[in-house]
Image (cartoon, rainbow, N blue to C red):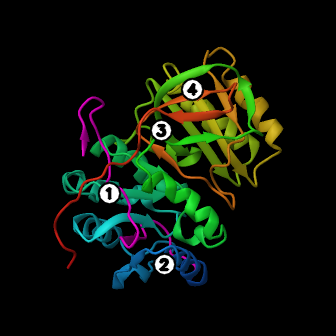
Amino acid sequence: MIDKQNKIIKPFILNPGDEIGVVAPASPFDFKKFNQGVSVLENLGYKVVILPGLFKTSGYLAGSDQHRADIIHKMFAASNIKAVFCARGGFGSLRILPLLDFDLIKKNPKIFLGFSDITALLSVLKEKCSMVVFHGPNITTLGNSGEQFAKTLLNAMTENKPVEIQEPGAIILKPGIAFGRVIGGNLSTICHLLGTPFAPAFKNSILLLEDRGEALYRIDRMLTQLKLAGCFKELAGLILGDFAQCNDKQLIYQLVKSVFKEIELPILAGLPIGHIQQNITIPLGIEAMLDTERKGIFFQEAAICSEIIQTEIK
């Protein structure tokens, strides 16, 4: 459904018994972790659809670039598939961006879920297709979280009401309230999109950033690159998710405050989003309010709608 007021396309609600298609846009994946994630979804009453070529490998990639793009196309073109979840992040999502059929995807809007390297696809589907997407667990990380957590993440896709995310332990780096469409995801992946035809639009947005295994000097360099590129000039607000296996988080927070010293916008850090066991799901592409005093982000509209699409998978 197209939200005429905001000119965005919302995917269709996920109902019990619906079929979820799995794609692997980036790296190969661990079969044990993959099967655990699939089992979680099946135990919750969903049918998981896996195409034969999903398990292909080509070095550090899950098959050739065209192969990985083709599986995405097949899943979006199929009426029996109501959501598309990514198997894993890793490396390689950027390579398939020029191969994607954005017209096909835009005509068949569906829930699209993933994180880490999948940030490239989340950003591009939001920009090129004006489609709401979901930053949340990949299949291979879902199994470690447990069914109760999986139910919570699915709330954003199964309940036609605005999502609210509050974290009592969140840290206020700069106080205030901001309104804007939420964008972002993995910091290093966002930096790699700069200077390409697929770079995100930062103006009047609330930017989410998270990462894993990056030294403080690399985080500094990436934030500085974004700043020098003008990405922060008209940014509405900033959310920091988890920075797993990075330096001391307090040092990261000090760095962020230094980078944004002359920029007036609210910054809330320490939200459970990213490379952690319980990586909460957050919709991208719709309006939200960031309120540092309430330590949360409050979406102003539902991320999904309740209509049905056509065309069978073959």
- Specify the amino acid type for callout 2: Glu
Q: Which residue is mark 4?
A: 237
| CA distance for labels 4 and 3 | 10 Å
Mark 2 Cα shell of 10 Å, populated few (<14), some (14-19), many (≥20): some
Comes first in the chain, label 4 or label 2 = 2
Q: Which residue is mark 1?
A: 110
Tell me what residue is drawn at x 54 percent, y 80 percent: 39
Look at the numbered discs 4 and 2 and tell me whether their residues touch, using CB distance below 8 Å.
Answer: no
Which residue is pictured at 70% across the width and 24% down the height?
Answer: 293
Cα separation between marks 1 and 2: 19 Å
Q: Does residue 254 lie above or below 139 as drawn?
A: above
Say whether residue 288 is left or right of residue 112: right
Characterize the local packing of mark 1: few (<14), some (14-19) or many (20 or more) Cα atoms within 10 angstroms.
Answer: many
Q: Secondary structure at mark 3?
A: strand
Which numbered disc, 1 or 2, marks the residue that appears first in the sequence?
Answer: 2
Q: Main secondary structure of the magenta part?
A: loop
Q: CA distance from mark 3 to mark 1?
A: 18 Å
The mark nearer the N terminus, 3 or 2, is 2
In the figure, 260 relative to 187: above or below?
Answer: above
Indicate whether 187 appears above or below 40: above
Q: Residue sitting at 45 percent across and 32 percent down?
A: 300
Question: Horizontal placement of 251 versus 201: left or right?
Answer: right
Q: Secondary structure at mark 4?
A: strand
Can you say whether 253 is above or below 33 in the image? Answer: above
Q: Is residue 181 magenta?
A: no
- Residue on which disc 2 sits: 42
x, y percent for residue 62:
44, 74
- The amino acid beneath tag 3 is Ile
Helix, strand or loop at disc 1?
A: loop
Q: Position of residue 164 (x, y in %)?
A: 56, 40
Q: Residue 173 at what x, y percent from top left?
A: 73, 26
Disc 4 or disc 2, which is closer to the eye? 2
